[in-house]
Image (tube, helix red, strand yellow):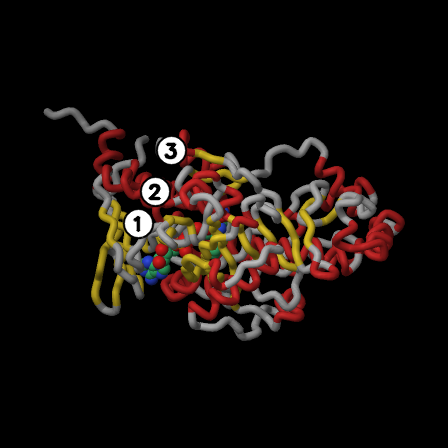
């Protein structure tokens, strides 16, 4: 009589019979796919566009291959683990210059974000590095923070309201709002202090002032930098795709899934009425709009609440001949004080990455200029965003016209003349701009979505709209969610006793 199969063999067999379909080939989808392929599950990735990586995107501009979307990750953490696991550890690089400047201050001035600050909130408003932002009168107003009873505002978790009430409008508008809008496309009024700066709130109670709380938080603070790869983030996507191929996964581009359905035999991904793939585990890894369309019929309205009015970010990448930029006059990135400038910020990519500066050659520079939609009327962009960000976009649909605005505004933000004749090439790309995990209400909404999704056997949802927008959040969440659904599928019918 043949011996009874080992539980382990049974699990392996079961894994081999568990069909996984991942809809969306951005970083979230690729990581989830890899997690499932690793244990022997047959995996199919369906990507709507003709390229994998989603917001990790590259383009060739004036002969240089350059990141036009995401370009780095918060140093260390899960992304670094992933990079090491993929054998890319020896390609990790750190920025040459990663200072952040804010432009559009009084009389058109610009200044670097003070070192002693958190989210743009200064530890000491009298510090010389703070004065270019708020002047003497702003410093006096901010100093009131030290004199006011700490608990007059209670436990204020709305970043905009907290900063405004403690330190005044100047700190909020000229130091905090440019960073919040420039980095994440959200008004400070939409940011939850406890998620954006863990510990700040309790330090405020302890120290008696917001400035004191910032100083407290800065004690012993290390790192906080970013990392990338020699050659940008494309090698990360390429390595993931290569690993998937080694494990026999099928990765198809140009396949847009328009619906999903489920019966006793499992899930099906549809294009119109046509079934494009059948699955035991279905992972939705698209951007917010498609996730809402695909999931809402099954998981209810929690998804649509979360993905409603999800903004977009257009990035114009310019390659310019401008030797005046060689000295990186405004660090690695510049964000404007909300005002007449339409861009949300300029990343001076060749100032940050030496591999890119080398590829560009002497005197040639790469600038990523971001524009957010829906954007409110420019004069009061961040105030309007507080009123729900519903104002119509005012960006020209024509790429050349937007590139022209990008050139003029990059010139203003960087404080360097950039004539039209300096432009060697440009490229425009558009992306979803999911909110950061620190956006107010994000956690509650995400929990509601996860609860509804988890009720449907074999269904998983990953991606920045659910995890929060940073690559660290996206990768960690995709791993966890893949593990959850993978474990549930394997143990449901093959649990070893
Ligand atoms: C301009 C920009 C710069 C950023 N820079 C950084 C950075 O430097 N560092 C950082 O940590 N974070 C950065 N972020 C955030 C981070 O890049 C994103 O949060 C992350 O890449 C999103 O990954 P994702 O897989 O969730 O979504 P996406 O990258 O949007 O991928 C979703 C994929 O699903 C596909 N898809 C959509 N609908 C369907 C469908 N119906 N059928 C099939 N496929 C579909 C899409 O084509 C896309 O490929 C940036 C974001 C933006 C917008």
Residue 287 percent across, percent down from the top left: 41, 59
Q: Residue at x 38, y 32 (%)?
A: 85
Residue position for label 1: 281
Q: Is residue 158 above or below residue 476?
A: below
Q: Nearer the viewer, residue 320 or 289?
A: 320
Q: Is residue 211 left or right of residue 365?
A: right
- Sequence-wise, the earlier of marks 2 and 3 is 3
Residue position for label 2: 486
Query: The residue tagged with tag 3: helix, strand or loop?
Result: loop
Q: Residues within 10 Å of mark 2 (few under 14, many from 20)?
A: many
Gap in Å between the C-alphas at discs 2 and 1?
Answer: 8 Å
Q: Nearer the viewer, residue 460 or 276?
A: 276
Q: Nearer the viewer, residue 447 or 143?
A: 143
**Residue 255: quadrant of the picture:** bottom left
Q: Residue 88, labelled with which disc?
A: 3
Residue 353 percent across, percent down from the top left: 48, 41
Gap in Å between the C-alphas at discs 3 and 1?
Answer: 29 Å
- Sequence-wise, the earlier of marks 3 and 1 is 3
Residue 337 percent across, percent down from the top left: 67, 60
Q: Quadrant of the C terminus?
A: top left
Query: The residue tagged with tag 1: helix, strand or loop?
Result: strand
Query: The residue tagged with tag 2: helix, strand or loop?
Result: helix
Do the CB atoms of the residues marked 2 and 1 lie less than 8 Å apart? Answer: yes
Q: Residues within 10 Å of mark 1 (few under 14, many from 20)?
A: many
Give the quadrant of ligand 1. Answer: bottom left
Q: Residues within 10 Å of mark 3 (few under 14, many from 20)?
A: some
Q: Is residue 446 above or below residue 384?
A: above
Q: Quadrant of the N terminus?
A: top left
């Amino acid at each position: 009589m043949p011996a009874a199969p080992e539980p382990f063999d049974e699990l392996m067999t079961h894994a081999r019979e568990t069909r996984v379909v991942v809809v969306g080939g951005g970083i979230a989808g690729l990581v989830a796919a890899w997690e499932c392929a690793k244990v022997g599950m047959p995996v199919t990735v369906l990507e709507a566009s003709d390229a994998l990586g989603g917001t990790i995107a590259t383009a060739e501009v004036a002969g240089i291959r350059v990141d036009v979307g995401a370009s780095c990750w918060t140093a260390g953490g899960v992304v670094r683990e992933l990079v090491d696991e993929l054998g890319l550890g020896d390609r990790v690089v750190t920025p040459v210059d990663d200072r952040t400047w804010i432009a559009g201050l009084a009389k058109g001035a610009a200044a670097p974000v003070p070192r002693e600050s958190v989210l743009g909130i200064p530890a000491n408003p009298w510090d010389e590095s703070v004065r270019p932002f708020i002047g003497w009168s702003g410093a006096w107003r901010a100093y009131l923070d030290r004199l006011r009873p700490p608990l007059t505002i209670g436990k204020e978790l709305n970043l905009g309201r907290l900063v405004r009430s403690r330190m005044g409008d100047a700190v909020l508008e000229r130091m905090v709002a440019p960073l919040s809008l420039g980095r994440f496309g959200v008004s400070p009024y939409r940011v939850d202090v406890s998620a954006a700066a863990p510990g700040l709130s309790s330090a405020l109670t302890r120290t008696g002032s917001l400035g004191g709380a910032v100083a407290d938080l800065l004690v012993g603070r290390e790192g906080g930098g970013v990392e990338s790869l020699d050659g940008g983030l494309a090698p990360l996507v390429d390595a993931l795709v290569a690993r998937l191929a080694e494990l026999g996964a099928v990765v198809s581009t140009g396949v847009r899934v328009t619906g999903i359905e489920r019966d006793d035999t499992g899930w099906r991904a549809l294009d119109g009425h046509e079934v494009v793939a059948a699955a035991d585990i279905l992972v939705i890894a698209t951007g917010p709009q498609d996730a809402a369309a695909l999931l809402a019929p099954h998981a209810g309205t929690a998804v649509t609440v979360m993905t409603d009015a999800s903004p977009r970010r257009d990035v114009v990448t310019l390659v310019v001949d401008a030797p005046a930029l060689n000295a990186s006059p405004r660090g690695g990135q510049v964000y404007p004080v909300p005002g007449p400038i339409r861009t949300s910020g300029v990343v001076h990519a060749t100032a940050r990455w030496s591999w890119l500066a080398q590829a560009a050659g002497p005197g040639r520079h790469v600038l990523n200029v971001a524009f957010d939609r829906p954007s409110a009327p420019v004069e009061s962009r961040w105030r309007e965003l507080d009123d729900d960000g519903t104002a119509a976009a005012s960006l020209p649909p024509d790429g050349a016209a937007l590139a022209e605005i990008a050139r003029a505004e990059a010139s203003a933000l960087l404080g360097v003349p950039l004539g039209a004749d300096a432009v060697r090439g440009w490229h425009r790309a558009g992306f979803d701009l999911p909110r950061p995990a620190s956006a107010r209400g994000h956690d509650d909404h995400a929990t509601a979505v996860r609860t509804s999704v988890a009720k449907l056997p074999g269904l998983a949802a990953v991606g920045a709209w659910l995890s929060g927008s940073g690559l660290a959040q996206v990768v960690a969440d995709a791993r966890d969610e893949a593990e959850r659904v993978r474990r549930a599928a394997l143990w449901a019918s093959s649990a070893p006793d």
